[in-house]
Amino acid sequence: MNATATDEDEGRFAAHAVTLTVNGQRRQVEIQPWVTLLDLLRERLGLTGSKKGCDHGQCGACTVLVNGHRINACLTLAVMHEGAEVITVEGLAEGDALHPLQAAFIEHDAFQCGYCTPGQICSALGLIVEGEARSADEIREAMSGNLCRCGAYPNILAAIEQVLADDERRPE
Amino acid sequence: MSPFAYRKPAALDEALALAGPGARFIAGGTNLLDLMKQDVLRPKLLIDITGLPLRGIAPTGDGGLLIGALVSNAELARHPEVLRRYPLLSRAILAGASPQLRNMASTGGNLLQRTRCYYFYDTATPCNKREPGSGCAARDGLNRIHAILGASEHCVATHPSDMCVALAALEAKVVVAGPEGERRIPFADFHRLPGDTPHQDNNLEDGELITAVELPPTGFASHCAYLKVRDRASYAFALVSVAALLELDGGLIREARIAVGGVAHKPWRDSEAEVALIGQPPVEASFHAAADILLRDAQPLAHNGFKIELARRCIVRALSDAIGGGRP
Ligand code: FES
Ligand code: FES
């Protein structure tokens, strides 16, 4: 901002205090309103697991869970998430123990370059939480918001199917 | 994105008082932020309405359903009352976008989606919708996805929403609040045809905010279908989509509704085509006749002529599907 900034500009450039929980940790930040949740995670909090593929809601590489729902972090303003619980791919493993989805992705070789993978895994977690998709066709449709330019789709599907099947076998 | 100020009012009055030139309401933000990143929209102030109490889904006095403007598309599509009484609406919503986007996108915002015309998004080209008076690059450009009905020399854009096609068929009402108080707009009068003012997508007045969508008591749950045809199996806008609703009586059609998406600046309905079906047997010949009426004035551009035949077939197929395609 330069010395001739008007009052209006002062308002426009004002930063906002936002407190949110990311992977179980309370984070307090001062951010400008146009910072997306994705940019907050990557640029301010150093959580570069969530990827910026298209930055326009078209690829799903930025998928994270907010209050239990999967969303595109690139198409939402961080300032609108005061008090939110955010889970990114960094929050899935318990110490050295991988999340079942992470393990299944490795077991099924469900990636090549890996760029889409954090988004795929977070999206698959959202899918499991929703509890609606069961058949292969339903899983494909429910994963349609996540593109994989390497074309690892068959293996991504196999990994998710396995985790769903394991969940079903597990006693309540 | 150009810098902007941000406010989050806690009450409706406060939100309405903040509205003014250069200000925009934001809820899900999935389309607005996209357009801001593309520099198509440059609001000076965003009014975050997600703190307003507009998240309910409740029965209305006359047996309909009132859906708060902030209900997410995902929540609406899986609401038990919607699944039971208005399965068409649920299916249309699930045919659109991706699960991530449906978790963010709001009911009110879905109605206010802007066209996905390439030239509207490309600030290097003329577009009367984005820059009134600058011209229409789509008319003589790449227009495979554009309108075949109700277009004007100024604009050939289509409305992108699936949900709105269902709401048009169901004859919902849009509840809006503004400086003059509350009013209800019949769905058919909400969106506009482009005419010579294509920059106006709808008939909201300055400063008005959608607070709810009201569904009438009748959801045609026994005979409904939503058919969407697009360039890939999922997660793409419709080339053509059709919402079909039928009411049968003694083997004949008592009432029919056909709304077509992807073909015009708003969900397209034609009362003559619907009236022609009344008293007819629900067979393909009747459906063909109705489709012919609905498409009688269709005008192809250089690349979208295929949509006329595609729409014809989709109408016939959706009406056929509707006979057996009710609630499971
Ligand atoms: S980066 Fe968010 S959807 Fe592509
Ligand atoms: S693994 Fe390369 S994009 Fe999916």
Image (cartoon, grey):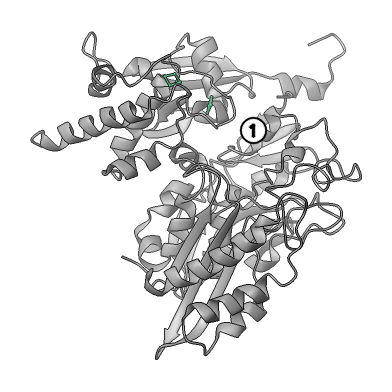
Nearer-the-camera pick, A60 or B108: A60
Q: Position of residue B244 (x, y in %)?
A: 51, 69
Q: Residue A149 appears at what percent x and percent y?
A: 48, 24
Q: Quadrant of residue A138?
A: top left
Q: Quadrant of the N terminus of chain B?
A: top right
Q: Is residue A117 left or right of residue B33?
A: left
Count of all numbered marks drawn on residues in the image: 1
User: Which residue corresponds to the image point at 65% horizontal and 74% vertical from the top-left?
Assistant: B292
Q: Vertically, is B69 above or below A29?
A: below
Relative to residue B250, is residue B192 drawn left or right?
A: right
**Above or below, comparing residue A1 to residue B247 in the picture:** above
Q: Quadrant of the C terminus of chain B?
A: bottom left
Q: Quadrant of residue A26?
A: top left
Q: Residue furthest left?
A: A171
Residue at point 27%, 44% (across, down): A135
Instruction: Give the class, few, some or many, for how many residues have Cα within 10 Å of label 1's Cα (few <14, many ≥20).
Output: many
Asked if residue B171 shows in the view, the reply is no
What is the chain identity of the residue bearing mark 1? B
Residue at 41% over, 75% down: B323
Reading the image, the residue beneath label 1 is B34
Q: Classify A82 as above or below B30.
A: above
Going 61% across and 84% down the picture, which residue do you hit? B276
Query: Can you tell me which quadrant of the image ligand 2 is in?
Result: top left
The amino acid type of the residue labelled 1 equals: Asp
Task: Specify whether tag 1 is near ligand 1 (CB below 8 Å).
Answer: no
Where is residue B293 drawn, in percent x and y?
67, 76
| Residue B282 percent location from the top left of the image | 46, 81
* Any part of residue A83 in sight: yes
The answer to which of B24 and A121 lies nearer the viewer is A121
Residue A74 figure quarter: top right
Q: Secondary structure at mark 1?
A: helix
User: Is B196 left, or right, of B46 in this rendering?
Assistant: right
